[in-house]
């Protein structure tokens, strides 16, 4: 039993749980928006949220599996030696010899099986309609870096992530929780999806040069120009807030949803940090209170990842603050 628990902890740790807010917060938001509606059931909603989390962790491991199958992970170390500012921590649990590809694939399938089992439990309550959301989301998740589509290698990663963690995830959890669809949730899922896509896009800007070296065509690589990358980042961030404003003006959302504008300073701060990354990549920055939690910062500095993590975590925390505001507003507005 103890060995099994250690194995589970090992795989959860390597499935990048720091990224879980990308799925957990939109899922909890959808659950909170469904609370109080006719037909609401915690017994159907909570398994849907847990299934989303299991699926997310599994897809993170699948991403490692497919990426490693293509070019291994040693190329990141080679790029670092060439002078590229590359993250070299990805797949360290494989390159260090702690595990192998066969066990990684088993872990991927195990997380997928847990997600499928939880999805089946929801189907017993809500019927097969849940599958219309779950199956496309699973297909997109596997196709993110998996064959034959490998969408993240063709500049479509941000679109895939935005759809999965926005409309598909929130619509699926909402329906699982209360057995109906809702226009307000659909409207909220758009900016949430944009902010999740922003996390991936922020990542791809910082990894642009290593991705070019690895032959990976992300959206940032597709844009080529740093100026176009920053312009697209501005549009992505602005669109998230403008969509909420549009929803309020058109009457789809209560005026209280304008409180999401409180997250604008975080968005502006992220844009400024990315601007500095493009202009002065060597410049160091320290976490500030307004940036939100930054984890074990000393360890990140020691690993040489502080330049990357301060921006990636700020993008994640922006999503978290945005979702938490809407969660509070959704209860106030009921």
Image (tube, rainbow, N blue to C red):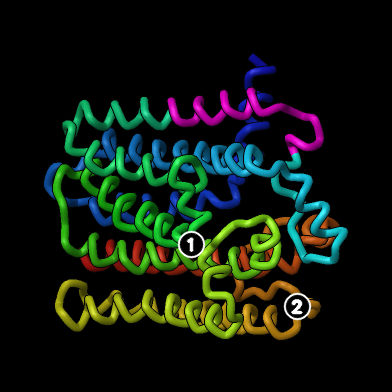
Location of the C terminus (image quadrant): bottom left
Within 10 Å of disc 1 (Cα), the crowding (few <14, some 14-19, many 20+) is some
Label 2 SS? loop
So how many labels did they put on this image?
Answer: 2
Q: Main secondary structure of the magenta part?
A: helix
Q: Quadrant of residue 71?
A: top right
Q: Residue at x 64, y 67 (%)?
A: 208
Asked whether 285 falls inside the magenta stretch, the response is no
Query: Can the viewer see residue 186?
Result: yes
The stretch of residues the image draws in magenta is 93-113
268 over 42 or under it: above or below: below
Residue 82 in the image: state x and y as whole percent: 85, 62
Q: CA distance from mark 1 to mark 2?
A: 23 Å
Q: Residue at x 47, y 43 (%)?
A: 56
Front position in the image: 225 or 139: 225
User: Cβ–Cβ below 8 Å for labels 1 and 2?
Assistant: no
Dot 1 corresponds to which residue?
Answer: 155
184 over 26 or under it: above or below: below
Q: Residue at x 53, y 61 (%)?
A: 200
Dot 2 corresponds to which residue?
Answer: 281
Dot 1 or dot 2, earlier in sequence: 1
Query: Can the viewer see residue 13?
Result: no
Front position in the image: 7 or 168: 168
Q: Residue at x 47, y 57 (%)?
A: 157
């Amino acid at each position: 039993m103890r060995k099994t628990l250690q194995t589970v902890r090992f795989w959860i740790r390597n499935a990048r749980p720091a990224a879980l807010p990308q799925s957990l917060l939109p899922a909890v938001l959808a659950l909170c928006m469904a609370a109080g509606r006719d037909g609401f059931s915690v017994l159907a909603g909570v398994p849907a949220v847990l299934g989303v989390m299991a699926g997310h962790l599994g897809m993170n491991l699948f991403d490692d599996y497919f990426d490693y199958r293509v070019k291994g992970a040693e190329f990141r170390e080679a790029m670092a030696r060439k002078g590229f500012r590359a993250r070299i921590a990805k797949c360290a649990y494989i390159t260090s010899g702690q595990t192998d590809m066969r066990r990684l694939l088993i872990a991927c399938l195990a997380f997928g099986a847990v997600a499928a089992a939880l999805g089946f439990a929801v189907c017993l309550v809500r019927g097969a309609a849940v599958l219309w959301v779950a199956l496309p989301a699973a297909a997109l998740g596997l196709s993110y870096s998996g064959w034959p589509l490998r969408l993240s290698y063709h500049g479509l990663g941000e679109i895939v992530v935005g759809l999965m963690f926005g409309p598909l995830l929130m619509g699926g959890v909402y329906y699982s929780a209360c057995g109906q669809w809702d226009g307000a949730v659909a409207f909220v899922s758009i900016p949430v999806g944009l902010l999740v896509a922003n996390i991936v896009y922020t990542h791809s800007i910082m990894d642009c040069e290593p991705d070019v070296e690895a032959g990976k065509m992300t959206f940032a690589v597709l844009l080529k120009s740093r100026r176009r990358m920053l312009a697209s980042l501005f549009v992505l961030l602005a669109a998230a807030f403008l969509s909420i404003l549009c929803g309020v003006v058109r009457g789809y959302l209560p005026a209280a949803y304008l409180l999401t504008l409180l997250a604008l300073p975080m968005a502006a701060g992220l844009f400024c940090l990315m601007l500095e990354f493009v202009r002065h990549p060597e410049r160091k920055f320290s976490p500030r209170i307004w940036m939100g939690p930054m984890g074990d910062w000393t360890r990140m500095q020691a690993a040489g990842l502080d330049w990357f993590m301060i921006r990636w975590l700020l993008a994640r925390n922006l999503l978290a603050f945005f979702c938490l505001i809407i969660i509070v507003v959704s209860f106030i507005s009921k």
